[in-house]
Image (cartoon, rainbow, N blue to C red):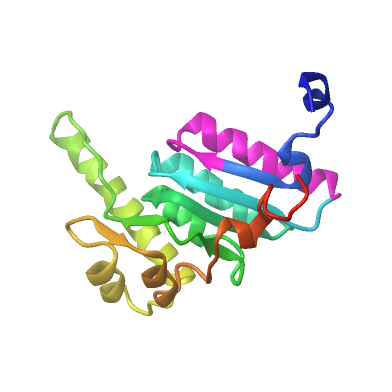
């Protein structure tokens, strides 16, 4: 199909297929939030599919995305491909239970919140309070969206002082993901029997 035919194809978001690729920033999270809200307002779809390939990014931008995912009346299935790390892992986990899919070659990264602040003593103390609040929010998210039952389990297994890398099988065992499936199983494979 030529370039003219490409222009007539609907965007993937018209099918409810959204993506979170690259760094999570205020702009990227804001754009994704608007897309989720738009799909909900239009009310034409019964499911949103969020593809994630991101090493993470800004916590507060990510928290805004998590709040909109929770707000969505339309279930959001998540599919992790490539790397799903840090704040992107929290977004992946927030997908509808039973519909959190990883491809076999996906790498997952979990780690503690990281920030660098400067200023006078009072400002540093204020930042420390905010850092503690962010850490608590992250721990509670893990408790809500995994099989881990205690804060101690979360901190010992997934929010250690060093990065924790997981393979898809480990993510399923911990309740971070539900299914490991190839892209062929998820969407069919063009050129291998599926219609192109």
For this rendering, which residue is in front, 183 or 48? 183
Residue 10 is situated, as x and y percent measured from the top left of the image, at 80, 34
Image-quadrant location for residue 32:
top right
| x, y percent for residue 6 | 78, 26
Numbered disc total? 0
Q: Quadrant of residue 56?
A: top left
Residue at position x 35%, y 51% in the image: 134
Residue for point 68% across, 56% down: 188
> Is residue 22 rendered magenta in the image?
yes
Magenta-drawn stretch contains 154: no
Rendering quarter of residue 169:
bottom left
Q: In this view, does 125 lie above or below 45?
A: above
Residue 100 is left or right of residue 22, and the answer is right
Q: Which of 151 and 190 is in front in this view?
A: 190
Give me the residue at 45% from left, 33% from top.
Answer: 25
The foreground one among 103 and 173 is 103
* The N terminus sits in image quarter: top right
Quarter the C terminus occupies: top right
Q: What stretch is highlighted in magenta?
A: 20-44
Q: Where is residue 114 in the image (x, y as percent from the top left)?
A: 25, 45
Q: Main secondary structure of the magenta part?
A: helix
Which residue appears farthest toward the left when viewing the image? Answer: 121
Task: Give residue 125's position: percent from left, percent from top.
Answer: 19, 42
Q: Could you tell whether 138 is left or right of 4 in the image?
A: left
The answer to whether residue 147 is above or below residue 14 is below
In the image as oriented, which residue stretches furthest toward the front? 192
In the rendered view, does 79 fall on the left or right side of 23? right
Q: Would you say 80 lies left or right of 34 here?
A: left
Tell me what residue is drawn at x 50 percent, y 56 percent: 92
């Amino acid at each position: 199909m030529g370039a003219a035919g490409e222009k007539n194809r609907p965007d993937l978001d018209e099918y409810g297929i959204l993506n979170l690729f690259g760094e999570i920033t205020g702009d990227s999270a804001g754009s994704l939030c608007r897309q989720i809200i738009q799909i909900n307002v239009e009310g034409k779809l019964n499911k949103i599919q969020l593809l994630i390939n991101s090493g993470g990014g800004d916590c507060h931008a990510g928290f805004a995305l998590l709040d909109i995912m929770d707000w969505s009346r339309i279930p959001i299935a998540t599919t992790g491909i490539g790397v799903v790390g840090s704040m992107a892992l929290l977004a992946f986990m927030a997908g509808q239970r039973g519909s959190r899919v990883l491809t076999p070659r996906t790498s997952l990264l979990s780690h503690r919140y990281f920030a660098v602040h400067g200023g006078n003593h009072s400002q540093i103390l204020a930042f420390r309070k905010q850092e503690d609040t962010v850490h608590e929010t992250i721990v509670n998210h893990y408790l809500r969206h995994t099989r881990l039952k205690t804060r101690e389990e979360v901190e010992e297994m997934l929010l250690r002082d060093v990065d924790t890398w997981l393979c898809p099988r480990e993510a399923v065992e911990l309740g971070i993901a539900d299914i490991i499936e190839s892209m062929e199983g998820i969407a069919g494979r063009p050129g291998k029997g599926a219609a192109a």
